[in-house]
Image (tube, helix red, strand yellow):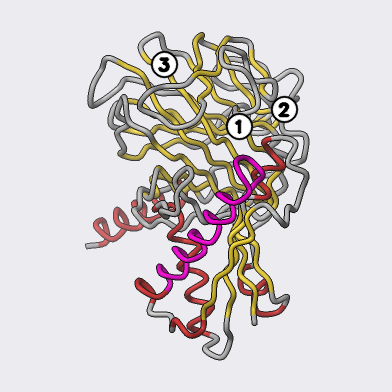
Amino acid sequence: MKKNLLTLTIWLISILCIGQTTSKFDFIPGEKIIFFDDFSTESIGDFPLQWLTNGSGEIVTLKQLEGRWFQITQSGYYIPEVNDSFTDNYTIEFDMFTLSDWGAQIPSVVDLYFLSGELANPGYGSQPGLAGLKIQPSYENIFWNNWSEAREWQGDEGMANFTFKSMTKYHISFWIQKQRVRMCVNDQKVLDLPKGLQANYTYNIFRIDDNSSETTPLISNFRMATGMPDMRNRLITEGKLVSYGIYFDVNSDKLKTESTPSIKEIATILNENPGIRVKIAGHTDSDGADDLNLSLSKKRAESVKNELIKTYNIDANRLETEGKGESQPLAPNNNALNKSKNRRVEFIKS
């Protein structure tokens, strides 16, 4: 009996320390966008200007995908040149698509690194920087390990079950809170590592490595944001909440499944505060015709309202909608980063 109890205790400790697979999806992006690239402002065939590399790649379009994509064409590292500091709390998200002849299970997609080091000299190899975390999808698993100079390049390791398929679009998101690292793929949380990052280091590099000649990865809509949004305080106390966690298909008012955590949190706030009413305002960037942007922003605000009513039973009389189109930008519409700041949904207490 004692032996069985000891075995169970060791197993529980290992789960808490190393991380586990879970289907709970709770990703909400940070509230300050510090990097965004959808490759829309540069020419097809060029290497994107905001990325560092020792490899090669180009911006492309594909018939089966919307928008522009960064296709990695040569093994090496690929680093978004983020000028702001990551802070202790931040999120990273991007879309990924893989060309491969392997079918259902591909041998390797990319290696993903969180590193403490020099952006101008990021190094290479399996354990670069002063400290790091490596996440490696392969076949039906996602492997991970971390290390640091202080621990003589040693650390923890583990794995979770998940299969990336070729010719399939995935939305990958990371939520970092000090040492804790959570990874979601589409609407499924696949990793939750309470001690994923080793302590006493400043992690300032996110790196994508392509080491495989058997797959061709493509990425798009890469966004990094800092700060965990205090949605309750923003709406109840300050009277206005700006959300970047509500996603739509391109030129559409159809909500993406990644919007669920943000909308659910707003519904929770409204249910806990039954006396308040809210105006939902949709905003766009300046791309496209003014009248089409205005119409699209109105429809998107209506979609959010309908979701709150249908799924979370919020009284329709407490919600009103408004479309602002491109009329109230938060930043000049002069680059991809600023345009991403202007595409938003606002909730205003009334």
Q: Amino acid at mark 1?
A: Gly
Place residue 5 in its image quadrant.
bottom left
User: Whole-percent x and y of residue 259?
Assistant: 46, 56
Disc 2, disc 1: CB below 8 Å? Answer: yes
259 vs 123: above or below: below
Q: Amino acid at mark 3?
A: Thr
The label number, if any, that marks residue 117 in the structure image? 2
Q: Residue at x 56, y 33 (%)?
A: 133
The label number, if any, that marks residue 162 in the structure image? none
Q: Mark 3 highlights which residue?
A: 216
Q: Residue at x 72, y 33 (%)?
A: 82
Q: Residue at x 47, y 21 (%)?
A: 61
145 vs 225: above or below: above
**Picture quarter with the N terminus:** bottom left
Q: Sequence order check: which comes first, mark 2 or mark 1?
A: 2
Q: Mark 1 highlights which residue?
A: 132
Q: For mark 3, does the 10 Å Cα neighbourhood hold few (<14), some (14 to 19), or many (20 or more) residues?
A: many
Answer whether residue 131 is magenta in the image.
Answer: no
Element type at mark 2? loop
Q: Sequence order check: which comes first, mark 2 or mark 3?
A: 2
